[in-house]
Image: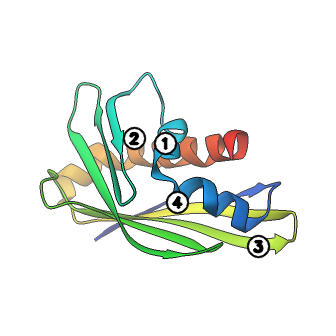
């Protein structure tokens, strides 16, 4: 199992407000690099998109703990399986720490190809969360 953890950032908003933003899966599109994705779709339980020049990705909600955690996992029709956990830790009433952890079931060869781009993507998403949440 490959574990990829994004950087940790302090978001100057309450954890519940940031959670409310990410749990509305339509908002995930705002966290993704628009020049690298297409065909974004979302509903209450899942979202999907196509990575430009690569594979389609579809994730569904597995668990949601208000103000703390949104757990997502790939649907069975993805090329490889992974989970993505969006963690929020309240610092005080007006700010929280945010980061993501991805656990991917990939072989060594695939790991060498995707680890760096996925780390960059998850760091990008946390940076965008700071801007838009």
The x and y percentages for residue 92 are 87, 72
Give the mark, 4 or 2, whose residue is nearer the N terminus.
4
Toward the viewer: 44 or 8? 44
Toward the viewer: 43 or 133? 43
The x and y percentages for residue 62 are 36, 72
Q: Nearer the viewer, mark 4 or mark 2?
A: 4
| Residue 27 can be seen in this image | yes
Q: CA distance from mark 4 to mark 2?
A: 24 Å
Q: Residue furthest front?
A: 44
Q: Nearer the viewer, mark 1 or mark 3?
A: 3
Tell me whether the residue at label 2 lies in contact with that at label 3, contact meaning CB atoms closer than 8 angstroms.
Answer: no
Query: Which residue is under mark 4?
Result: 23
Tell me whether the residue at label 3 lies in contact with that at label 4, contact meaning CB atoms closer than 8 angstroms.
Answer: no
Residue 117 disc label: 2
Secondary structure beneath label 1 = helix
Q: CA distance from mark 3 to mark 4?
A: 16 Å
Give the mark, 1 or 3, whose residue is nearer the N terminus.
3
Query: Which residue is under mark 1?
Result: 120
Residue found at x 48% / y 31%: 33
């Amino acid at each position: 199992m490959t574990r990829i953890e994004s950087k940790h950032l302090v978001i100057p908003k309450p954890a519940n407000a940031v959670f409310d933003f990410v749990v509305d899966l339509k908002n995930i599109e705002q966290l993704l690099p628009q020049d690298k994705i297409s065909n974004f779709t979302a509903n209450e339980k899942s979202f999907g998109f196509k990575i430009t020049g690569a594979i389609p990705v579809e994730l569904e909600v597995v668990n949601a703990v208000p103000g703390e955690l949104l757990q997502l996992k790939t649907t069975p029709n993805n090329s490889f399986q992974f989970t993505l956990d969006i963690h929020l830790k309240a610092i005080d009433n007006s700010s929280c720490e945010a980061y993501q952890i991805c656990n991917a079931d990939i072989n060594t060869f695939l790991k060498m190809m995707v680890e760096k781009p996925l780390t960059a993507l998850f760091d990008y998403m946390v940076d965008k969360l700071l801007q838009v949440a």
